[in-house]
Amino acid sequence: MLIIQSMIDGILMGGIYGLVAIGLTLIFGVMKVINFAQGAFLMLGMYVSYWAFTLMGINPYLSIFLSAAVLFVVGAFVQKTVLSRMMDAPEHNQLLVTLGIMLIIENLALIMWSPDFRSVELGGITQTLRIGEIGINTPKLIAFAFAIGLTVLLFWFLRNTLTGKAIRATSIDRQGASLVGINTSRINYIAFGIGAALAGVAGSLITPFFYTSPDVGATFILKGFVVVVLGGLGNFIGALVGGLIIGVSESLGGVFLPGSLKELMTYLIFILVLLVKPNGLFGGKSS
């Protein structure tokens, strides 16, 4: 029973990891940039929801629209003002720039809001939904449902809208997309903005059950990269499946291993998969 309980918890958390990873893989697929600032964007999303709840009483699940809008603007601004100047730079320079952006955002948050842990207490929502002997954390279940819904919505957007098709075309062949009239520079900031918005929404979704602090992004960014590589760089379905795998393995690791070693199972699975499939489970871009 404990194993089943752990697997359910892992699947619910895996949906959040998948949402963060989808933002990462969208940015990489379009711009070929590894975005270390994604964790900082998630942290900003958490603070948007925290302050919206604290100052105006807005439920964190409703403030996802606010955090998505704010983080889209932040992401588009970062891309247009900083990363657009680095598009032709070596990959390691791009990586270091995003790492620098992450450090700037985290330290600004530290100055503005202090290192104190903050939390949101939601009234009117039962914390645990019981099905027989199995207990399901209600905030995590709601977050998982939102994460899956947003993933489906993004998939539809990319396949059925002109902007989505332009994003896909740019990710497949940037030069070819330019030749047929697509403004690839505009697509860059739209894609980066969407990726940042997804991180912000993920932050809002975990606010009811996870602490908020300036360094919280570091907890998720490493797992986000593991999920992206595990699923296959540039593959949305792989990012979601990879997130579920990492969530379950992390949860089961907490059952079978001492607390200090619970992450071991996650990275062991990661290494084993890459030994068998170096390009990840779904290696390559989804069509």
Image (cartoon, rainbow, N blue to C red):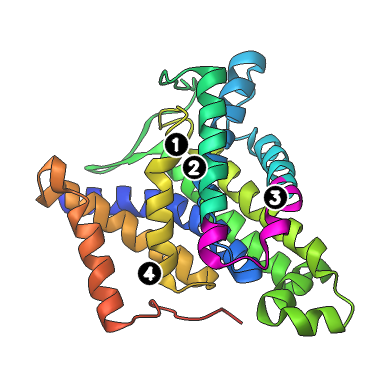
Q: Amino acid at mark 4?
A: Leu
Question: Which type of secondary structure does the marked residue at label 1 adopt?
Answer: helix
Q: Nearer the viewer, mark 1 or mark 3?
A: 3
**Label 3 Cα crowd, 10 Å radius (few <14 / some 14-19 / many 20+):** some
Lower sequence index among marks 4 and 2: 2
Disc number for residue 82: 3
Q: Nearer the viewer, mark 2 or mark 3?
A: 3
Closer to viewer: mark 4 or mark 2: 4
Circle 4 is placed at which residue position? 230
Q: Are marks 1 and 2 in contact (CB under 8 Å)?
A: yes
Question: In the rendered structure, which disc, 4 or 1, sits on the residue that comes first in sequence?
Answer: 1
Q: On the image, numbered disc 2 is attached to which residue?
A: 142
Q: What span is colored magenta in the figure?
A: 78-95
- Verify whether residue 85 appears in magenta: yes
Label 3: which secondary element: loop
Closer to the observer: label 4 or label 1? 4
Q: Magenta region's main secondary structure?
A: helix
Q: Report, in whole angstroms, how far the alpha carbon at label 4 lies from the one at label 2.
A: 25 Å
Measure the C-alpha gap from mark 3 to mark 4: 29 Å
Q: How many marks?
A: 4
Q: Amino acid at mark 1?
A: Pro
Q: List the residue tagged with mark 1.
A: 139
**Which mark sits nearer the N-terminus, 3 or 4?**
3
Q: In this view of the protein, which residue sits in the foreground, 41 or 246?
A: 41
Query: Are the residues flagged by discs 3 and 4 in contact, CB closer than 8 Å?
Result: no
